[in-house]
Image (cartoon, grey):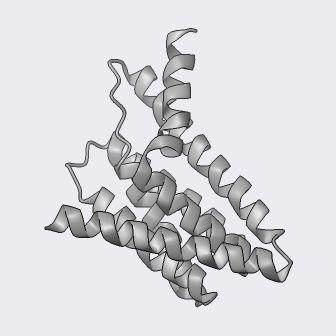
Amino acid sequence: MSGLLQTFVEGFINPLVTPAHVLTLLALALLLGQQNRPVSFLVFALGLAGGFVAIVLAVEATPARTVLLASAAVLGVMVAAAWAPKPLALLLAAIMGTALALDSPPQAVTIADAYATLAGTALGACAMLFVVATIAAHANADWQRLGVRILGSWIAASAILVLAVWLK
């Protein structure tokens, strides 16, 4: 595999295997599917782009992972309650996009490799968000909607537990 393709694939896989990223993306995707608000997807992508611009401009270390877990907890509760005010959902989508990008700095030697990693991360995060949101949007039976709400509560509980251990 060529160098750029390999770094792109590494970037693509990053949001799919980093636990904080997975929890956050699952929570937002379930909310998008549950509430049928595709605008939040665009806001997430814009936040992701803004975070990557900050990385390119060499922003210093941030508490992005803590922000991701806190957002996952809030979104998990919103999914479990099947309640999401539109302004809050949009704000959280933007925050999550930016935090996910800031938590994914490339470990590349060359600029081209770094850009390939960032592009892979963006595509991987958006792909996971889109696929899970589409599946959640098709959960129309009562038992399926209940399953989405239960999954939201598990995401919230997991994020809160991790935050509690980190902040101890």
Name the image quarter holding the N terminus: top right
Give the vertical position of 148 relative to 122 (above or below). below
The picture places residue 105, in percent across and down from the top left corner, at 34, 39
| Residue 168 position within the rendered picture, expressed as x and y whole percent measured from the top left | 13, 67
Farthest-out residue, top: 2
- The answer to whether residue 72 is left or right of residue 13 is left
Q: In the visual, does 88 lie left or right of 71?
A: right
Q: Residue at x 78, y 74 (%)?
A: 144
Residue 68, image quadrant: bottom left
The residue positioned 86% from the left and 78% from the top of the image is: 141
- Residue reaching furthest to the front: 143
Front-most of residues 129 and 51: 129
Residue at the spot 75% in from the left edge and 79% down from the top edge: 145
Residue 5 appears in view: yes
Percent coordinates x, y for residue 38 in the rendering: 72, 70
In terms of depth relative to the viewer, which is nearer, 149 or 74?
A: 149
In percent of the image, x 38 and y 23: which residue is there?
111
Please say if 113 is above or below 75.
above
Q: Quadrant of residue 114?
A: top left
Where 67 falls versus 109 (above or below)?
A: below
Is residue 39 visible from the viewing direction of this image?
A: no
